[in-house]
Amino acid sequence: MDLLGKSVLDLKQLISKKEISADELFKYFHKRIINHDQKLKAFITVLNYEKNNNDGELSGIPISLKDNYSTKKIRTTASAKVLDNYIPPYNATVTQKLLDAGICLQGKTNMDAWAHGSSTETSDYGATRNPWDINRAPGGSSGGAAAAVSAYLSPAAIGSETAGSIRLPAAWSGVIGLKPTYGRVSRYGVIAMGSSFDCPGPITLTVEDAALILKVIAGHDKYDATTSPIAVDDYQTEIKKPRQHMSIGIADEYFEGLEDSLKQKISDSIKVLEKLGHKIKKISLIPPKYAISVYTILQRAEVSSNLSRYDGIRYANDRTYFGAEAKRRIMLGTYTLSYGYYDAFYKKAQKVRTLIIEDFNRAFKDVDVIVAPTTPITALKLGEFEKYPFFGEVMDILNEPAAVAGIPAISIPAGLDKNNLPVGLQIMGKHFDEKTILNLAYQFEKETDFFGVIKRGVKNYE
Amino acid sequence: MKKTELTKEEIIHLAKLAGLNLTAEEIVKYQQQFSETLDYINNLNELNTESVKPTSQTVDLSNVCFEDGEQNKRQLSINEVLTNTSSKTADNFKVNRIQ
Amino acid sequence: MNRKYQPVIGLEIHVELKTKSKMFCQCKADYFNEKPNSNTCPVCLGLPGALPVPNKKAIDWTILIGKALNCTINNQSKFDRKHYFYPDLPKGYQISQYDEPIASKGKFRVQNLEFRITRVHLEEDTAKLIHAGNDTLVNFNRSGVPLVEIVTEPDFDNSDDVKKFLEELQVIIRYLGVSDADMERGTMRLEPNISVKLKVKNEKLRVDDLPKYKVEVKNINSFRFVKQAIDYEIIRQIELLEKGETPKQETRGFDEKKVITYSQRSKEEAHDYRYFPEPDIPPMTFDGQYLDKIFRQIPELPQAKIQRYVKDFKIKEQDAFIITRIPTLAVFFESVIPNLKSQTCLPARQVSKLNLKIQNYEQNLANIIINKKISTNLSPSEFTQKVLSLSKPKKTNLKLLDTLINRLIEVNQKTVEDYKKGKQNALMFLVGQVMKEMKGKADAKIVIERLRIKLH
């Protein structure tokens, strides 16, 4: 049986029809990891098959988790040497929900250490490679997860996004990445980076897979006070509803400085949406460069705070084990919170955050979704990130506004650029309106099959 | 373009507040990098926020709490608590004596 | 009292709440006698990924304390992170409150004095450190227990007032039932801030012209030591000022054996706590309806109770003060009174018109309780029996008594059955009936004896 490239939905069918067993399926992917991961370095920890007796929406499906998800009795490092030997005594809520749904945990994937980065190059355990070109970065910080799915080492993976950490690697690695609304999915047990930004989310090969996984992991959690009590939609049903004449917002501010062939692919994709009967509307949004500043200040302040607990007393190595990027962010965060500077930086950033939220609210009165490129350029060569003092934040310029506002966004492949590297298109929606952005993404998928990008990417690893 | 520079002493003070040990090279490197970052984020001053309220959270929630006396389903055994460190006695975490 | 100098003292008091659960997780808040580190979870241990969710009761009880101290309960409140590194602080920050505390701007009357309360806020307690040789051991059982911080304005100028204030505050906290408020066990902690300034002629007692330094004193474990520590510190500071020196702004410890304060070898820099709003916890808003519901939980507080006792029971104010120091004692006192009433067989109105020295049984009762003549460990009716037996023996017509008893037993069969079933109150009822018929001319002790014999 040729399993290559089969979606989670496909695999579910095979399992329920008993055409393959859970451990056979697990072994299939496990073998692929053994064969390809030496080169790709997508995984930090690879696990052996363990039967999961739970019968749920994802019974028998192998899934990998980014290494910032606490997994009970399984090493969790956030790709940081500080946590080199840390073994959590509890499961994150997302981990537990997936296990309750029947998944077979394949392992933990590589990331930028502490999620501080946009290329997975700051992992304390070495960079993950982009499956499309192993001399390039897969994007980050969920680079391991995106690479694993792109090369079909995992049929689906769970990543996390603070500002771009799901969307950017999905774009650079040619797969689908969904950042849900902040508060849609519980952060309990996810090693905290930016507390008011962090969103767990799926990285998949099909839109329906993303819809299914989102439904499993979303929902109110009594252990996370920032989760919403708003009911979780049946996303799988919602994406198939025939929704026509959506109003799609395009803002010129998100199209500046794009590489030409990337810009072309985005243009082509927008034409597809028009062809599907949707209306393109020109809107104006606050230039994303301000979101960079807001995000840099607030995120680094929260990072400096969230990393205070690593004193080496109860667990982990001491603070001398922090890498350069972590130290840099802690320092800036400490500065912007320190006496005399709080008003000028932190408080000011919070106020501009309000402006950005109001800006989106205004726009969404006129349009249903907003479409833009996910990144201004495609995958960079390894090592280039060092040229920038706040590289991550600059790479994610187009992702930060949605992250700052807490709205949901999905990145889908929109073709290849002149270097045959994947281009990502993102669809942003209103708070808790994942069903609409998923629906439009699903329509796009049905119409274009993502211009064959995903299939081609998987085939590279036959 | 105005350059915001931190002095060496300021960097050292920050490092202390942040619980970090920096090498001499790191101090110099951070001085420079800080400058670049601070200059960029100062662009926020181009926006008027006079009558704007700050946002702490994007979820519109308030009064989230739990009922006192709820069953504790997350209690850890002493073993689980002490398992991730080697600096301990049979029951306690151990550090160098604090004055 | 020094003629030249005036002490300026403010207090910072911490009260550990006796909720069932900790402040941000479901671990037990009662950590005494638990094996070290046996009472924790990912939240109070500060594990990576753990998140706090606040305990509703802790918030409500903070509102209660604020209201009892006549504070304004703020409509909006939130938690903030307070950053510093210390082994007893697992997250490297304490979740506390900074600029939007639950309650603020209150005042507290103690006898004839009034002291201003700056704020009342809610936070979490730290772990416990135990020094052992070259090591310090850390036990996280206490980490995360709810802690209420009460800060006063620097309105005190002597240690006696401070002691009175603390004692009254302790009683109030116990009346509210929110904490044991025990200095020795650490459920009530005090850190006074002490400075001294020159007295100025005709200066009002409270002027905002504060000295440019203040000394914080820690590690004081009883009210007695509070007085000693403050007195010592005032003298120490005056001596320095007389020499032309300004006392150093610092934190000092208190040595109860030597009865001195000493400099703690901690860092002298002012703390930069880098407060910012706790992103993991949504803010709190309290509307009028919600607050009213909570305020209704406030019992009659000691000061009001004292006034009522003096007015309604006509007992001496100092006796009312003593009885009201312990909430359960006041309850006991009031529950015995109706029992006694039914024994004197005279309507209450009449009692008050009579000579109080003889007939004021409430005052007699107060005397008995205060002088500990009878243990209060008894039920109210048992206690009443003992009281009656202490009262002056009256000449009793035994023949009349027996006749009466026989008749009453016949007429009150149900009550007799109840007594035989073990209901002590039934006996007292019969005693009351007897006394009524005898028009009080009987020795209660004898009545009870005879009744008991007849009933068997």
Image: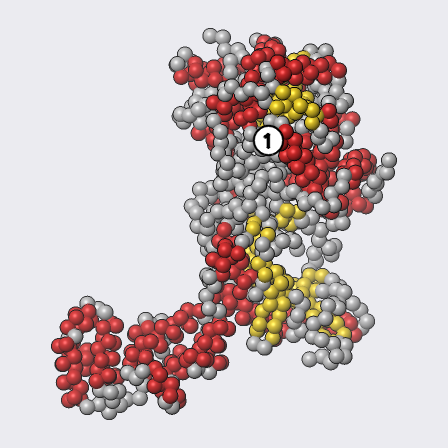
Q: Chain of mark 1?
A: A
Protein image colouring: secondary structure
Which quarter of the figure has residue C337?
bottom left
Q: Nearer the viewer, residue C205 or C423?
A: C205
Quarter of the rendering occupied by the C terminus of chain C: bottom left
Specify whether residue C138 is in view. no
Count of marks, rendered view: 1
Across and down, in percent, residue C386 comes to 31, 79
Q: Secondary structure at mark 1?
A: loop
Across and down, in percent, residue C139 comes to 54, 50
Up-down relation of residue C391 to residue A273 (above or below): below
Up-down relation of residue A16 to residue C271 (above or below): above
Q: Which residue is mark 1?
A: A430
Specify whether residue A227 is in view. yes
Residue drawn where x is 33% and y is 76% of the image = C338
Quarter of the rendering occupied by the N terminus of chain C: bottom right
Residue drawn where x is 18% and y is 86% of the image = C401
Mark 1: amino acid: Lys
Up-down relation of residue A58 to residue C170 (above or below): above
Task: Judge the density around disc 1: few (<14), some (14-19), many (≥20) Cα neighbours within 10 Å.
Answer: many
Across and down, in percent, residue A237 comes to 47, 22
Across and down, in percent, residue A460 comes to 61, 9
Q: Is residue A202 left or right of residue A286?
A: left
Up-down relation of residue A144 to residue C117 (above or below): above
Q: Is residue C240 left or right of residue C388?
A: right
Residue drawn where x is 39% and y is 14% of the image = A18
Residue drawn where x is 33% and y is 73% of the image = C380
Q: Nearer the viewer, residue B43 or A322?
A: B43
Q: Is residue C293 left or right of residue A456?
A: left
Q: Nearer the viewer, residue B13 or C66?
A: C66
